[in-house]
Image: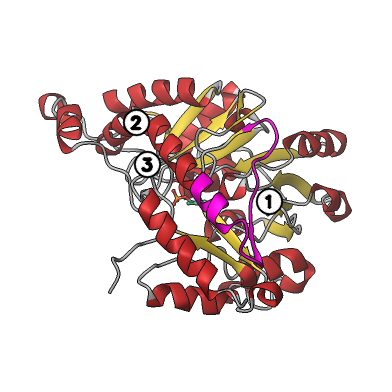
Amino acid sequence: MEDRILVTSATLPEYDEYINEIKSIWDNHWLTNMGVKHKELESNLKDYLKVDRISLFANGHMALELLLQAMDIKGEVITTPYTFASTTHAIVRNGLTPVFCDIREDDYTIDVDRIESLITPETSAILPVHVYGNICDVEAIEDIAKRHNLKVIYDAAHTFGVEYKGRGIASYGDASMLSFHATKVYNTIEGGAVCFSNEMLGEKLYQLKNFGIKNEEVVNGIGANAKMNEFSAAMGICNLRHVDEQIELRKELTMVYREQLSDVPGIRMCNEQKDVKHNYAYMPIYVDPERYGHNRNELFEYLAGHNIHARKYFYPITSAFECYEGRFDPSLTPVASKTSHNILTIPIYPTLGVEAVTRISKHIAEFAVK
Ligand SMILES: *Cc1c(COP(=O)(O)O)cnc(C)c1O
């Protein structure tokens, strides 16, 4: 049997580096509630991400859920169903109605040409996703939002460190949510953040992640508990020192994939976007069953037979989830629906190595019907 390859592998600093980072916690006994490590990480990330303000959270999902609450979003939110469960759930859990917009065929981000036809008097915000690290058409979205007086909130869970025209991607829109989950390009074990520019929003987010507590005697918000603890922040401080190096390794592996898969009929990959500094977070391949000779599910099984574990990410689209049965109509977003049936996310992580990428590419190529 060939060696087992999983779709991703969580990044860790050297053991000693982390142990050294958490030593001071034994001196001050400050384990959570916006401690020393938390403050240091906030400051480091603000610089690295090139954003005005940042608020750290226990995870990306709670960051997004509480962000919608903090911004007092009402009614309908235009979003995409081609995403992780979190995006849609955060909208619904706030008592809001997601209105699903279809995606583009080339980079799977929201199709900006279809947004305006979905706007109603109830619409209050647009919540697009920078999916796989590909960025949305932020300029067109800003233009639409301005003309219709809508808020723009990005799910930027996939775009850690991505820049557009030299600007941090999380600085676009009214606010962006980032995820620092173990499986992402950059992790704090579990963790997340909201990047924003309005100072007032910072205060609200701070309260909502801490039970709505204003001060010792005043609780003026119906908050949750979503604070990042000191051990997570310490992991984040360590991982941030190495993230550029890791993105470089991801880039090298992506180039090898692109070269080795470029001639395989029926396999389509994403291209570099103009003026974008990418993070190479994922390696999605679109399998055209007519030209490839096999469908996505057959390729998934074939790779599994060679001990290569890819993921059907994203499948199904969120509007087709069992929990939303009868509530949304997945056929209204045909591109998203079709993509979810044909997409396969193949392994990529910094330590995967060129040899493994070559082996995976070889198996994908040999399974094509000549
Ligand atoms: C990972 C992810 C989230 C949620 O982040 P967590 O930190 O795991 O809570 C939200 N949206 C997208 C697109 C994601 O991939």
Q: Position of residue 170 (x, y in %)?
A: 58, 32
Question: In the image, is 326 to the left or to the right of 18?
Answer: right
Vertical arrangement, residue 157 with respect to residue 241, above or below: below
Q: Secondary structure at mark 2?
A: loop
Q: Which residue is mark 3?
A: 187
Q: Position of residue 312 (x, y in %)?
A: 52, 68
Q: Is mark 2 within 8 Å of ligand 1?
A: no
Q: Residue furthest front?
A: 370
The three-letter code of the residue at mark 3 reads: Asn
| Mark positioned earlier in the residue sequence (1 or 2) | 1
Residue 58 numbered mark, or none = none
Please state, as top left, top right, bottom left or bottom right, where the C terminus lies in the image. Answer: bottom right
Q: CA distance from mark 1 to mark 2?
A: 28 Å
Evaluate if marks 3 and 2 touch, with contact meaning CB atoms under 8 Å apart. no
Q: Secondary structure at mark 1?
A: loop
- The circle drawn on residue 242 is 2
**The residue carrying mark 3 has its beta carbon less than 8 Å from ligand 1:** no
Is 259 displayed left or right of 306 in the figure? Answer: right
Identify the amino acid type marked 2: His
Give the x, y percent position of residue 320: 64, 73
Label 3 – label 1 distance at C-alpha: 24 Å
Give the labeled residue for mark 1: 107
User: Callout 3: helix, strand or loop?
Assistant: loop
Which label's residue is closer to the chain start, 3 or 2? Answer: 3
The range drawn in magenta is 255-276
